[in-house]
């Protein structure tokens, strides 16, 4: 795993590994009945210890995605919907999958723009700008607006998975979202590390997200590098 996973606000290493495997199962790259590599080999692949890897595999067992057969190995048991804290993250590397991580660029409370899609009940929102990575490779910049009435965001506690943060710290869970995918241009605030200069053509996603209330609680905009990543929606 790369160094970004070591930040206090990121998922623990064992959960990062379990999320990588869950995304591989969800994408169909690890099919039902397939045998995982030996634990020492798998631990080496993920740059961790066998002990940490086993904690990750235990998470898969809890979700019913893995069967550990004594003396034989670990086998994928994929059936139905695969639960993941990144289940709504639709960007993947063109080479396949990738663990999402993020670098926060700024967090600020602002007035909403009239140009936004309608969401929430307040005229203000918390604006979070981030640089997104898959397996440590920059693939997107995003701007997330959380309705101010949904709660105050503590910058020191924001995690790679905002949906997990919402559940753990603000007490609500995003249950559904609508995506609008088109072409856009890199915003002028994007850092050089994104790799696409301002006004360069990129993929563009607008998303409205809902929790329990009838009004959408979040609006986001994502600009992604189509040279290295693609938007993937799987229907089941």
Image (spheres, helix red, strand yellow):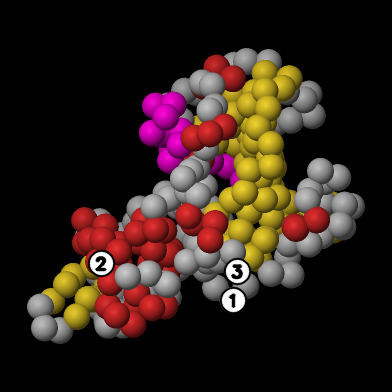
Marks 1/2: CA distance?
29 Å
From the viewer's perspective, is residue 204 above or below residue 212? below
Q: Are marks 1 and 3 in contact (CB under 8 Å)?
A: yes
Q: Is residue 40 magenta?
A: no
Report if the CB atoms under discs 2 and 3 are less than 8 Å apart.
no
Q: Give the range drawn in magenta.
A: 164-179
Residue 51's mark? Answer: 2
Viewer-nearest residue: 139 or 154: 154
Residue located beneath label 3 in the image: 93
Relative horizontal placement of residue 45, taking residue 160 as reference (left or right): left
For mark 3, give the secondary structure: strand
> Which one is in front, 2 or 173?
2
Kindly state the secondary structure of the residue where label 2 is placed: helix
Asked where in the image residue 46 lies, by quadrant, the reply is bottom left
> For the residue carrying disc 3, how many other residues have a C-alpha within 10 Å: few (<14), some (14-19), or many (20+)?
many
Q: Up-down: is 180 above or below 149?
A: below
The residue pinned by badge 1 equals 95
Spot occupied by residue 111 in the image (x, y as percentages of width and height): 73, 20
* Magenta residue check for 166: yes
Decide: marks 1, 2 in contact (CB < 8 A)? no
């Amino acid at each position: 795993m790369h160094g970004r996973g070591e930040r206090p606000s990121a998922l623990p290493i064992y959960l990062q590994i379990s999320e990588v495997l869950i995304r591989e199962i969800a994408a169909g790259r690890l099919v039902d009945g397939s045998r995982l590599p030996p634990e020492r080999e798998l631990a080496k692949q993920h740059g961790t210890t066998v002990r940490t890897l086993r904690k990750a595999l235990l998470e898969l067992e809890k979700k019913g995605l893995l069967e550990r057969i004594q003396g034989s190995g670990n086998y994928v048991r994929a059936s139905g919907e695969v639960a993941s804290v990144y289940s709504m993250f639709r960007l993947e590397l063109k080479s396949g999958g990738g663990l999402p991580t993020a670098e926060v660029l700024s967090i600020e409370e602002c007035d909403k723009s009239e140009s936004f899609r309608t969401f929430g009940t307040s005229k203000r929102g918390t604006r979070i700008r981030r640089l997104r990575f898959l397996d440590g490779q920059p693939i997107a910049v995003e701007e997330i607006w959380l309705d101010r009435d949904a709660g105050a965001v503590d910058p020191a506690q924001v995690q790679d998975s905002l949906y997990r943060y919402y559940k753990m710290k603000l007490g609500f869970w995003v249950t559904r979202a609508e995506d609008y995918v088109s072409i856009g241009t890199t915003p002028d605030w994007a850092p050089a590390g994104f790799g696409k200069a301002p006004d360069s053509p990129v993929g563009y996603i607008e998303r409205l997200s809902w929790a329990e209330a009838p009004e959408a609680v979040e609006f986001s905009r994502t600009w992604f590098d189509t040279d290295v990543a693609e938007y993937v929606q799987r229907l089941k």
